[in-house]
Image: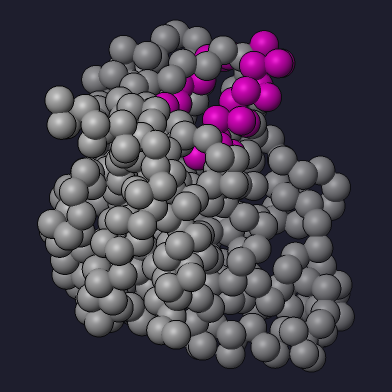
Amino acid sequence: MKRVYLDRIAAAPLHPEVLGAMLPHLKGNFGNPQSLHSVGQEALKAIEEAREKVAQLIHAQASEVFFTSSGSESNNFAIKGLALAQRSQGTHIVLSAVEHQSVLHSAKSLEKLGFSVSLVPVDKWGRVSPEEVRKAVTKETVIVSVMLANSEVGTVQPVQEIAEVCGEHKVLFHTDAVAAVGNIPVNVTELGVDALSLAGNQFYGPKGSAVLFVKKGARILPFIDGGIQEGGRRAGTENVAAIVGLGKAAELAMEELEERAEKAKPLRDKLIQELPQRVDHVFLTGHPEKRLPYHASFCIEFIEGEAMLLNLDMQGISVSSGSACTSKALKASHVLLAMGIDHALAQGSLVFSMIEDTTSEDIDYLLEVFPPVIERLRKMSPLYTEYLEEKKQ
């Protein structure tokens, strides 16, 4: 059976060169980076080299890069650490309605400590208006968080303009850039952000490798207390192999980002154009142009996403339904609902995200397999039967 992997938003494959860079630290270079002997200092040197590479990828200073274990941890670190550090100045947080659960749930935790949270709405494409952010900011606001790109619908946000609004009000601004870094150009100086989250598994690095960028001068409390690692900001013995892998992935992204994007865009556009022509009642989600280069997402009417996902898997095609963090919850995506999509339609979401090895033949195979899968599932759908009956009348 032909296998086609179109679920990059859940996890990209490990690049062979990344694995090669990690292996010495999995086999022989086992020293603790906090040890003063030469074995430990060798590990510390590898970490600092990786830190420099990540800093170069996002145009930051190495001292502003803090390693974590995941994008979710970075988001928790940012929202809780920044908000609590500024608590004497205010207790109000502004988020977009389409943020990742790790951001939304972090803010909910802070509500139990006396903070208040405002959610900024989005348009039908999932875009946040800087003016809506301006309306939401008050004298009590201490942090605004709006993601750079949404992994579920692919939409890229006007983060630079939102950062300007935050600057005018002297409010710290964090962006969840997990889906963006390594896939589109990201420059923290040009964006004007105070904090930024990224994760290596989104651009061919290892799972369990991530970063929180914190601009020099921004006050933040540690998320994990204990040792002196990461400048005292994040305790715990460092995962040297994963950090080295993240550094190598960042280095490769700097070299290949433009080439990867140019290869992915035609495949994305082919899918966006042809899938609705092959099957009726298929609706593109996310902005048609301002979106990630490897990302195409849809809602298919009358069918649940999980049913389509499982049937496509039986044909050798791996995709997502909603975000990786909510797809097992069997409920409609908060992102799609925030975009004004009907609850029933939102249940039928599918996300196709290409990897570097995806070919035009892979997209052709999907376009060939998809219509009979949908036809079979709709025959079993009471919603589709009801629709056909109403159409006859």
Q: Is residue 194 magenta?
A: no
Residue 20 sits in which quadrant? bottom right
Q: Position of residue 341 (x, y in %)?
A: 31, 30
Q: x, y (%) of residue 348?
A: 38, 43
Give the image location of residue 333, x and y in percent: 45, 36
In the rendered structure, does residue 97 fall within the stretch colored magenta? Answer: yes
Residue toward you, 147 or 238: 147
Write the start and end of the magenta stretch as one range: 89-114
Report whether 69 appears left or right of 134.
Answer: right
Q: Which of 192 and 253 is in front in this view?
A: 253
Locate residue 60: give its quadrant: bottom left
Q: Seen from this angle, which residue lies furthest top?
A: 139
Query: Can you tell which quarter of the image residue 65 is in?
Result: bottom right
Quick one: quadrant of the C terminus? top left
Residue 292 visible from this viewpoint: no
Query: Image point 31% across, 12% down: which residue?
Result: 135
Residue at 78% x, 52% y: name it.
Answer: 235
User: In the depicted view, which residue is nearer to us: 146 or 342?
Assistant: 342
The structure residue drawn at horizontal position 58% and vertical position 59%, both measured from the top left corner, is 210
